[in-house]
Image: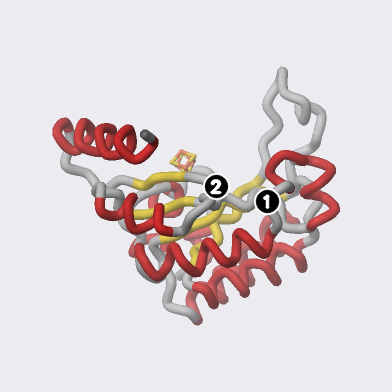
Amino acid sequence: MARRFCARARFAIKAAVDLPIQAQCEPPDDDRWFARMKASGIDTLGMHLEVVTPALRERIMPGKASVPLSRYMEAFESAVAVFGRGQVSTYILAGLGDSAEAILTMSRELIELGVYPFVVPFVPISGTPLEDHPAPTPEFMKSVLQPLGGMLNAAAMRSSDIKAGCGKCGACSSLSSYEE
Ligand code: SF4
């Protein structure tokens, strides 16, 4: 059912505009879904960690934390084998409590797997449970994005090479400006 829906959505989009498409999902029950998604015309994949410290994951997003980080890492490896190095990305929200070191350590592992870590500053939105949670300071963001840009450079992994999705768009983070 999901596969047919995905394929129909992809065909409808491609009929209207011939643009590359990113799909976003949680790690599936069966990694064969990645090949099915690719075969249906999806160009890139986003599987979003959001938060990387286990205790913080459990506190701030208990539903997502029911999927362990180890399962994300397995799924990332399988997805990169299908979509290609740099064509799988993950959103990491800086400012929710992860230390800069934790984000950078995870980012290093992700880059080694071929996953682009799209680190974005958390922005509080009124009317949501985290509306009073402060956004990260510019200094904190720089302490993450500057070394991360260096890691991406060293790995020759660039947002401009991503075919579609948030890493390609880049509007929610200044990360790409540190890649040069
Ligand atoms: S504006 Fe761009 S980076 Fe931000 S969520 Fe939308 S596609 Fe992703």
Mark 1: give few (<14), some (14-19) or many (20+) Cα within 10 Å.
Answer: few
| Quadrant occupied by the N terminus | top left
| Quadrant occupied by the C terminus | bottom left
Please report the residue visible at 36 percent of the width from the left and 47 percent of the height from the top.
22
Q: Earlier in the sequence, mark 1 or mark 2?
A: 2
- Res 146 → quadrant: bottom right
Residue type highlighted by circle 1: Val
In the image, taking residue 99 as reference, residue 164 lies left or right, namely: left
* x, y percent for residue 102: 76, 65
Measured along the vertical axis of the image, is residue 14 above or below residue 146? above
Q: How is the image coloured?
A: secondary structure
Residue type highlighted by circle 2: Glu
* x, y percent for residue 79: 44, 62
Numbered disc 2: secondary structure: loop
Asked if marks 1 and 2 touch (Cβ < 8 Å), the reply is yes
Please report the residue visible at 67 percent of the width from the left and 36 percent of the height from the top.
123
Numbered disc 1: secondary structure: loop
Please report the residue visible at 45 percent of the width from the left and 47 percent of the height from the top.
166
Measured along the vertical axis of the image, is residue 131 above or below residue 44? above
Query: Mark 2 highlights which residue?
Result: 26
Q: Is mark 2 within 8 Å of ligand 1?
A: no
In the image, taking residue 44 as reference, residue 152 lies left or right, namely: right
* x, y percent for residue 44: 36, 54
- Res 9 → quadrant: top left
Measured along the vertical axis of the image, is residue 90 above or below residue 76? above
Query: Mark 1 highlights which residue?
Result: 67
Please report the residue visible at 77 percent of the width from the left and 41 percent of the height from the top.
62
Residue 83 vs residue 148, the one in the foreground? 83
Residue 21 vs residue 71, the one in the foreground? 71
Q: Is mark 1 within 8 Å of ligand 1?
A: no
Instruction: Name the residue at the top extreme.
Output: 127
Instruction: Name the residue at the bottom extreme.
Output: 154
